[in-house]
Image (spheres, rainbow, N blue to C red):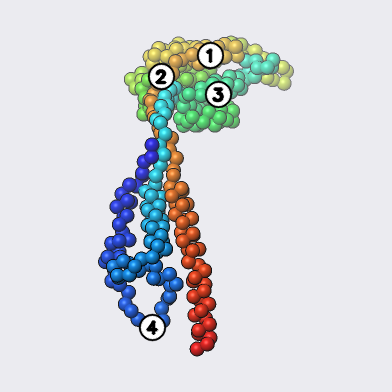
């Protein structure tokens, strides 16, 4: 169907007649004036003269041009059938531990030992790519928590910011409670059923202004589900000039992480190797997205160009019709002036 964005423009249709009725006729003068070769064709019937067929044709075309200009000014638009777009997915924040302990090399990736942050970048990066229906955000925390990327559908940016993260960027300690509080601040304005926080950490809370369980209680009150992933906990490797020394990783606090998840209706996972971490993300991928909203739109195509183009074409034809006579009149006036 066709709709007009500015239909009130059509009330200007009688404007030429109103102007002609209100404006006084031009006075007759003997002084020099601009002479139109087709002036007699524009004279009104009220003057008592017989309007020629050519004059009637000119006036009809002029009125048609005026109507086409009004039609273009009203901004006609073609509206297609309504298209419904279901918007699904979650508002999902990733909180990644970048404290000093993430430097321990107790994982293997591609057959070689890597530190904990490197394996998180690899596995979490693939997880980010698969969440095409979600808005994702990234929080980095160490001694303090920072918002690295706000909630966005731009998954590539989130993944890039994660890949560029370095250990110690937010300090060497671990502030899990502050990371939860920052996520709550970013998620509380979103639909309640879609608020999800995934925490990846390898240590216990050693810094921050709020205790993890207090932050988890607040998260539960505002409807933020927290999934905690404990990484490490297995034998940790440390490179030295004499080779790689292995020691038991005992800094993980699974009790607190599990309590955080239970308090908010989430789950706790522990991944002591790369395979287990992959399985954790596969489990998170199976979370059913809840419908956030259903929006509809109608495809719109602007049509003003057609009446505007036709009005321009008719104006050029009308002008070209009188151009030869105008030239002849100019030539005649030039000859008379030269002879005088």
The residue furthest bottom is: 340
- Label 4 environment density (alpha carbons within 10 Å; few <14, some 14–19, many ≥20): few
Total numbered circles? 4
Task: Measure how far apart labels 3 and 4 are at the Cα level.
Answer: 82 Å
Residue beneath the point at 32% across and 61% down: 16
The quadrant in which residue 3 appears is top left
For label 2, count other residues whose C-alpha is less than 10 Å away and answer few (under 14), some (14-19) or many (20+): few
Question: Which residue is identified by label 1?
Answer: 282
Q: Residue at x 31, y 49 (%)?
A: 8
Above or below, 167 relative to 39: above
Residue 51 placement: quadrant = bottom left
Residue annotated with mark 3 = 129
Q: Nearer the viewer, residue 52 or 83?
A: 52
Q: Secondary structure at mark 4?
A: loop
Where residue 87 appears, x then y in whole percent?
42, 25
Residue 117 horizontal side relative to residue 294, left or right? right
Percent x, y of residue 150 = 46, 31
Question: Which residue, given by chain and number where applicable, does mark 2 sit on?
Answer: 290
Residue furthest left in the image: 22
Task: Choose the circle earlier in sequence order: 2 or 3.
Answer: 3
Q: Earlier in the sequence, mark 1 or mark 3?
A: 3
Q: Nearer the viewer, mark 2 or mark 3?
A: 2
Measured in 3D between alpha carbons, the distance from the residue under mark 2 to the one under mark 3, in whole angstroms, is 19 Å
**Mark 1 or mark 2, whichever is nearer to me:** 2
Q: Which mark is residue 31?
A: 4
On screen, 29 above or below 52?
below
Residue 104 spot, x, y in % from top left: 61, 19
The answer to which of marks 4 and 2 sits earlier in the sequence is 4
Local crowd at mark 3 within 10 Å, few (<14), some, or many (≥20)?
Answer: few
Residue 334's disc is none
**Chain-order first, disc 4 or disc 1:** 4
Q: CA distance from mark 1 to mark 2?
A: 18 Å
């Amino acid at each position: 169907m066709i709709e007009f964005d500015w239909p009130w423009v059509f009330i200007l249709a009688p404007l030429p007649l109103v102007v002609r009725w209100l404006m006084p006729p031009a006075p007759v003068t003997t002084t020099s004036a601009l002479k139109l070769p087709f002036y007699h064709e524009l004279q009104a019937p009220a003057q008592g003269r017989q309007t020629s067929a050519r004059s009637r044709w000119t006036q009809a075309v002029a009125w048609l041009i005026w109507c086409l200009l009004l039609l273009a000014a009203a901004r006609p638009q073609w509206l297609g059938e309504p298209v419904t777009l279901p918007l699904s997915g979650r508002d999902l924040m990733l909180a990644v531990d970048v404290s000093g302990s993430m430097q321990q090399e107790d994982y293997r990736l591609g057959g070689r030992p890597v530190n904990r942050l490197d394996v998180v970048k690899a596995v979490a990066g693939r997880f980010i790519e698969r969440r095409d229906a979600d808005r994702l955000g990234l929080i980095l925390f160490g001694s303090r928590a920072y918002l690295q990327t706000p909630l966005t559908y731009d998954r590539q940016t989130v993944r890039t910011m994660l890949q560029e993260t370095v250990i110690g960027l937010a300090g060497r300690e671990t502030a899990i409670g502050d990371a939860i509080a920052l996520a709550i601040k970013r998620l509380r304005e979103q639909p309640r059923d879609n608020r999800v926080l995934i925490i990846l950490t390898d240590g216990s809370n050693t810094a921050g202004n709020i205790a993890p369980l207090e932050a988890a209680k607040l998260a539960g009150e505002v409807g933020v589900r927290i999934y905690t992933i404990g990484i490490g906990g297995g034998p940790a490797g440390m490179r030295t000039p004499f080779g790689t020394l292995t020691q038991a990783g005992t800094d993980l606090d699974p009790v607190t992480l599990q309590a955080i998840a239970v308090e908010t209706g989430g789950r706790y996972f522990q991944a002591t190797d790369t395979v287990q971490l992959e399985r954790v993300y596969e489990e998170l991928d199976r979370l059913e997205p809840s419908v956030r909203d259903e929006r509809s739109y109608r495809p719109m195509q602007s049509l003003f160009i057609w009446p505007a183009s036709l009005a321009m074409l008719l104006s050029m034809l009308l002008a070209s019709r009188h151009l030869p006579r105008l030239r002849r009149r100019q030539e005649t006036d030039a000859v008379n002036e030269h002879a005088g």
